[in-house]
Amino acid sequence: MAANETQMAVVQTTNADGASPVVLVCEHASCFIPVELDGLGLSDTAKISHAAWDPGALGVAQRMADRLDATLVASGVSRLVYDCNRPPEAAAAMPVKSEIFDVPGNANLTAEARAARVANYYTPFRDMLAQVVAAKTAPVLVTIHSFTPVYNGAPRAVEIGVLHDSDTRLADAMLDTAADHTQADVRRNAPYGPDDGVTHTLQVHGVAHGHPSVMIEVRNDLIQTETQQAQIGDMLAEWLADACNHLNAEAVRCRA
């Protein structure tokens, strides 16, 4: 397969000519496992579980892209194949276990096999996202994720997490304006935070270049249907636009 065909298969870009400075990212948009990986040895249940992807996140991100006229970059493969929100040296980039699920196809990977995963799945995603960000005059990086309501048997009360790395500007603005947009249980750096290694995309494509950035986590029971995804996407788009404008950044507006 030619390099450009590989890139098209593993990276999906929506609204490439979007006028907004916002760049939306969905690293865990898909549970697709390429046929040559033989399902990673997973059960049918594991292949579609939250361990394999972020259910509902892509629908939310697509709605936000439409409302904001923003470009969206999404991974086209399961995060168990390669987690595009992790650097190649991280064990979690190709995990041997995710919550309760063992991943046999990731056990005992050779250095060559790991390098092939990086080249085939991470590098095209990273390069496409870097290209999209570089094309914006004053980019604002926003990654969209979902999380399970119960993790390792423990229920989670938080409904929306606003996560950041060392640059807190956009997260602070969103938290300051949260009550104007939602009655949900909103928390900073929850249910994950920088210490959990979840801010790789923010670091590489946002913080390193001085671009405002934030990671939004939505509990996946709130975005199970297309209607819910649209409602949450609308709310997040309006909230994000408000927060960006509070930063006196380039104007971010929602379309009707």
Image (tube, rainbow, N blue to C red):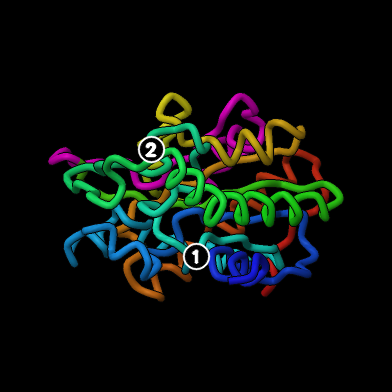
Which of 148/46 is in front?
A: 46
Left-right relation of 18 to 10: right
Three-letter code, disc 1: Gly
**Residue 3 belongs to the span the image colors magenta:** no
Left-right relation of 130 to 178: right
Three-letter code, disc 2: Ala
Q: Quadrant of the C terminus?
A: bottom right
- Using the image, determine if residue 40 lies above or below residue 107: below
- In the rendered structure, find residue 92 and report the number of the disc placed on it: 2
- Quick one: label 1, few (<14), some, or many (20+) residues within 10 Å? many
Residue shown at 46% from the left, 43% from the top: 112
- Using the image, determine if residue 97 lies above or below residue 50: above
Residue shown at 29% from the left, 55% from the top: 50
Residue 104 horizontal/vertical position (percent): 22, 49
- For disc 1, the marked residue is 76
Which of 193/81 is in front?
A: 81
Residue 89 horizontal/vertical position (percent): 48, 32
Secondary structure state at the residue bearing disc 1: loop
Tell me if residue 34 can be seen. Answer: yes
Residue shown at 52% from the left, 35% from the top: 199
- Res. 81 image quadrant: bottom left
- Image label count: 2
Residue 193 horizontal/vertical position (percent): 44, 30
Single out the residue that lies furthest toward the left. 153
- Using the image, determine if residue 72 lies above or below residue 165: below
**Residue 179 belongs to the span the image colors magenta:** yes
Residue 59 horizontal/vertical position (percent): 47, 69
Q: Are marks 1 and 2 in contact (CB under 8 Å)?
A: no
Which contiguous range is marked in magenta?
152-181
Left-right relation of 155 to 20: left
